[in-house]
Image: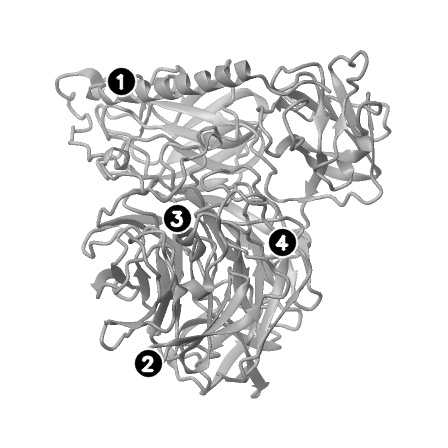
Amino acid sequence: MPSGRTRALDRLRALRRSSLLIAFALGSLLVGLTPLFGAASPAPGAPARRPAPVPFEQQTAMQAPHHPVVPANALEPAAPVLDRTGWTAAASDEETAGENGRAANVLDGNAATIWHSRWSGTPAPLPHGITVDMHRTAVVSGLVYRPRGDGGNGRVGEYAVSLSADGRDWGSPVATGTLADDGGAKTLGFAPQGARFVRLTALTEAGGRGPWTSAAEIDLLGDPGTPAATVDLPRTGWTAAASDEETAGENGRAANVLDGEASTIWHSRWSGTPAPLPHSITVDMHRTADVSALVYQPRQDYGNGRAGAYTVTTSTDGSSFGAPVAAGTWRDDDTVKTATFTRTASARFVRLTVTAEAGARGPWTSAAEIRLSGPANPAAHGSWGRITGFPLVPVATAALPGDKLLAWSAYAVDRFGGSNGYTQTAILDLKTGRVTQRRIDNTGHDMFCPGIAMLGDGRVLVTGGSNAEKASIYDPETDEWSATTSMNIARGYQAMTLLSTGEAFVLGGSWSGGGGDRAGEVWSPDTRTWRRLPGVPATAALTADPAGPYRADNHMWLHATSGGRVLQLGPSRQMNWISTAGNGSLTPAGTRADSPDAMNGNAVTYDVGRLLTLGGATAYENAPATRRAYTVGFDGGGRVEAARTGDMGHARAFGNSVVLPDGKVAVFGGQARPVPFSDATSVLTPELWDPATGTFTPLASMAIPRNYHSVANLLPDGRVFSGGGGLCGECATNHPDGAVFTPPYLLNADGTPKARPAITGGVPARVAAGASLTVATEGSVASFVLMRAAAATHSTDNDQRRVPLVSAPAGAGSHTVSVPADKGVVLPGIYLLFALDAQGVPSTARFVTVH
């Protein structure tokens, strides 16, 4: 068999990576020293000079010791930077009198030259746009915007990115959002697709300094992975044939790429005289289908034969193959690769031809698995909206009344570390799509890696994290943050839930705050103080993580029930009943069936007394994730039963799960092998679990990986926000953005919205548990459900709760709806009230506070 990677190649690649990082650092330093406009004073009408704030990346917080070193592949973007040879740029307006501010400067490779909107005389008003013409069609998945390095004037604030094949038909923007007002390069990602023209439109100036826009450089990114709005095609009945295969020295047959086992591979012939490159493998689907992408999984044992340069062609008859629908070069690592087609092809045969081995180890090619993807059916797989950019990485989020989403990161927008006493926050207005940013200083709290609980009055309680003893409260009615009493025990990565009593319970959290057991404690909204629970030690709920307690008591799954009790049902395989009365007590509740520990999996309440647990791994990182899912149910007597339900199609940890109004559960993102800050082994196919069948079905693929530090939230219109990931500083795996997913229950096959029932009245702002409402409706209504407003971070959302309601017709266009009296069923707090028709299509929700 061909020999493995040599040490000389390893040293060469390490030296190359180090040289690139040094060059990047020196380039950043030189850019930072470039004077504004290169002149002693601005010309009349020029944007005035203002002192620039210290960029977040230059602030002096130290990296927290508990996180691992950022992996090397986090520094390397999955999407290649496209070659700019032959490209041109044109702008809506440009400055040519007072300075050389021509559009062409964004493509000259010189960060000291800039495009600037016209400012001499009468400045051209916002918006300003710049269009890159690649003069060829290519798959594009992102725009990298580099602000000028000599000052802040003209930095892009709110933006839109649009694509066109011909420069005339632009359609709706593929990405919108708001950029942070700093000098760092910004990557504006979107679903990969074929295009020739890419336009960046600046709607505002980031610092409000004036009606101008500037840019030092613009790059475009190529194919990163499976495009959005596609699904894996079923491989039943498929066959594969290769130009050559190894059968003497090993089982390297072409058929192995379709067997679902990554441990078996196709390998080109290497025994005797190796077959020379190129090598090809052809998949015969034995039926014609629309195909949009080919997914290539390299062998997992070592690197020989990894595909480097490649082309993909298609055929309807197996003999006549047309021009390539995809071509490129994959990097030399073991991550899953995707070739996104420049156009959807109707084909029976799809051929991958490899012309170079990625590591130049020899004239061979190998593959573990090959999959094909096709366009999604919206009615079966849902659809994704445009990518919305945030001025920070949304590591934690909370759904708010008024159709808003609160998000925050750490002391900085793109990194964490230290105990700095302030937090970067943002609010997304779901009605307008606008994102606003604010730094919160008054609570003295860096809220990175916190516990979160939605309080009974709708406020958001945030505890610990980088400032491990602190606790802060956000009030959506006043849009203000305030400090509350610090916890008795400093914590980070702890779990929280509201109790049926209206108090908030916290447990675990050894990520920060020193040593010792992180026993439970309770916060009272009446006294605003914390009460210790010495009878509820965290040790009883630890996983067997090899890294010890600081990883073993993180991100617990908590479900509050009647009488101030809590079921701790994971991620440890051992479950426990917790009483919060007096000093508290903890009683074992059995194991989660045959489940092992499942750190960085999650649990979600899909019905009264019924929860679904999904994914996770036996260790916080660097352990295989699981495909397993379990249902956990309990009765009034405290008996807990757990059973394995259908497996997910993909193993995942660091994923996020959201229960929908119809009781189904959608799971987004995650990795097959959890590694913080890495996008390797990303799962880009969401799945939907149906409690009626216990099975998972695939949904439309995501455009951007959502792994460590990602979030997902149910929105008031029945859609789901999925975003975030990263927070590792100058790394390629930061994802300061998100997108809204429209589940299939809202869509017809052609993508148009289904008719929905509507709630037109009868929903007060506040309602007592046990009360009845007379709700006015329009359209066909079969049932009602309460969905608790929820907050997510680190794959955990203990606030999620779905409560089906008893209802009855009360005359034409109205229904009597009963709210459960048990506050262990309907915890105090803000809920979304949905009406559903007989097919499970939900209305837009009305907010109501249950007290």
**Quadrant (top left/top right/bottom left/bottom right) for the C terminus:** bottom left
Mark 3: amino acid? Pro
| Relative side of 685 to 134, left or right | right
Crowd rating for badge 1 (residues with CA inside 10 Å; few <14, some 14–19, many 20+): some
Q: Looking at the rendered structure, which numbered label has been put on residue 582?
A: 2
When the figure is inspected, residue 80 is found, relative to residue 838, above or below; the finding is above
Query: Of marks 1 and 3, which one's residue comes earlier in the chain?
Result: 1
- Of residues 194 and 293, the one nearer the viewer is 293
Mark 1: amino acid? Leu
Query: Of marks 3 and 2, which one's residue comes earlier in the chain?
Result: 3
- Of residues 800 and 183, the one nearer the viewer is 800
Q: Residue at x 44, y 24 (%)?
A: 219
**Quadrant (top left/top right/bottom left/bottom right) for the N terminus:** top right
Q: CA distance from mark 1 to mark 3?
A: 31 Å
| Relative side of 592 to 101, left or right | right
Q: Residue at x 40, y 64 (%)?
A: 538
Relative image position of residue 725 (x, y in whole percent): 45, 44
What residue does disc 3 label? Answer: 394
Q: Is label 2 in contact with label 4 (beta carbons under 8 Å)?
A: no
Q: CA distance from mark 2 to mark 4?
A: 42 Å
Q: CA distance from mark 1 to mark 4?
A: 47 Å
Relative image position of residue 671 (x, y in whole percent): 55, 44
Residue depth check, mark 2 versus mark 1: number of the one nearer the observer: 2
Q: Looking at the rendered structure, which numbered label has been put on residue 299?
A: none
